[in-house]
Image (cartoon, rainbow, N blue to C red):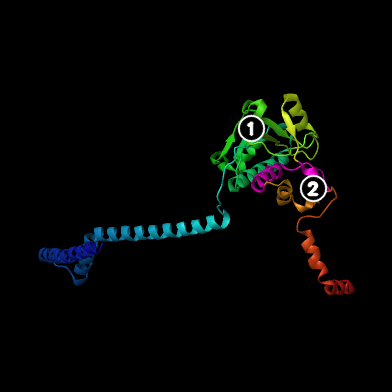
Amino acid sequence: MAADSVKGEQNVNGNDQSVENNVAAASGNQSLSKRQRKKLLKQQKWEEERDLRKQKRKERKAQRRLQRRSQEDEAGEAHSIRKWPRREATPSSLRLVVDCSFDTLMLLKDVQKLHKQIQRCYAENRRASHPVQFYLTSLGGQLKQSMDEKDKGWINWKDVTIKTEHYSGVVVKEELVYLTSDSPNVLAELDQSKAYVIGGLVDHNHHKGITFEKAKELGIDHAQLPLSSFVKMNSRKVLAVNHVFEIILAYLEKGCWQEAFFTVLPQRKGAVAIDPDGAPGRWPGQEEEDRDSESEPDMQDQSQERS
């Protein structure tokens, strides 16, 4: 690059002499004023330095591109470390299927809620320590339209199998287990060879028992999560799609249903742990909060006096 600059300077010096000779020749042919000779000299010099200016512009542009790329790489690394902490993942052979065949039973606003729940399932599975084999079946109708309009990147999702067919045409019948809170069968542990189906339905209890009935019609196995064995809830036991999905991911990581439930369930559900003898306990961590409050009786008394 330095050699190019020296070469360019030599060219300029040579060009200056050539320009002066041209001006002298022009002045010999006709009489030019001092201003005209200066203008002609400037114009010819500008023309002669055209290639040199072009070369310098290329060099500056290349330097700016390198600086910009370096800044983007640094920013990208910082963003990925901050937002997506990576950890060692051991994929599970267990399959989780979200059954999207209830599209016509939902209002558009509920379909959009289901879309967000599926997005959450995908994101959590990508970050899980034991990611499952994720399936979306019967995708179409309002749900696909919502995904096309609000999340066009879904077609590039990785580690997920998306089918327009019903799950019964994707997985053999003997390997299917439909997870439904209406089933009398309680799931004690997960079978890695099975495909567990989660009903993709947001209906606010308008179609109670429909997933259980569908499972019986198709003659496939069904079961409910052991929620009642470990948790007492003030609200109904029906969980959102992403809650069921995340609970199974948490169980695969922790190997304990109760820990999995309390890792995922929002406290607004009013859930409390059930002791081994069957008596309701406390939300994990609640005892420490109570001890902290008991250790400051004076502060509580002062607050009551002020009120």
**Rendering quarter of residue 92:** top right
What amino acid does circle 2 point to? Val
**Rendering quarter of residue 11:** bottom left
Q: Which residue matches tag 1?
A: 137
Give yes or no for residue 144 being in the magenta stretch.
Answer: no
Q: How many marks?
A: 2
**Is the magenta region chiefly helix, strand or loop?**
helix
Q: Is residue 230 left or right of residue 162?
A: right
Residue 228 in sight: yes
Q: Position of residue 264 (x, y in %)?
A: 71, 49
Q: Which mark is residue 47?
A: none
Element marked by disc 2: strand
Q: Position of residue 188 (x, y in %)?
A: 73, 39
Q: Is residue 65 left or right of residue 196?
A: left
Q: Earlier in the sequence, mark 2 or mark 1?
A: 1
Element marked by disc 1: strand
Q: Point out the image quarter for the C terminus.
A: bottom right
Give yes or no for residue 247 being in the magenta stretch.
Answer: yes
Of residue 236 and residue 147, the one placed in the foreground of this image is 236
**Label 2 crowd (10 A; few <14 / some 14-19 / many >=20):** many
| Vertical comparison of 3 with 232: above or below | below
Q: Which mark is residue 231?
A: 2
**Label 1 crowd (10 A; few <14 / some 14-19 / many >=20):** many
| Vertical comparison of 267 with 215: above or below | below
The span picked out in magenta is 226-254
Of residue 257 and residue 306, the one placed in the foreground of this image is 257
Q: Is residue 54 left or right of residue 191?
A: left
Q: Position of residue 286 (x, y in %)?
A: 78, 59
| Vertical comparison of 102 with 227: above or below | above
Q: Position of residue 152 (x, y in %)?
A: 57, 42
What amino acid does circle 1 point to? Thr
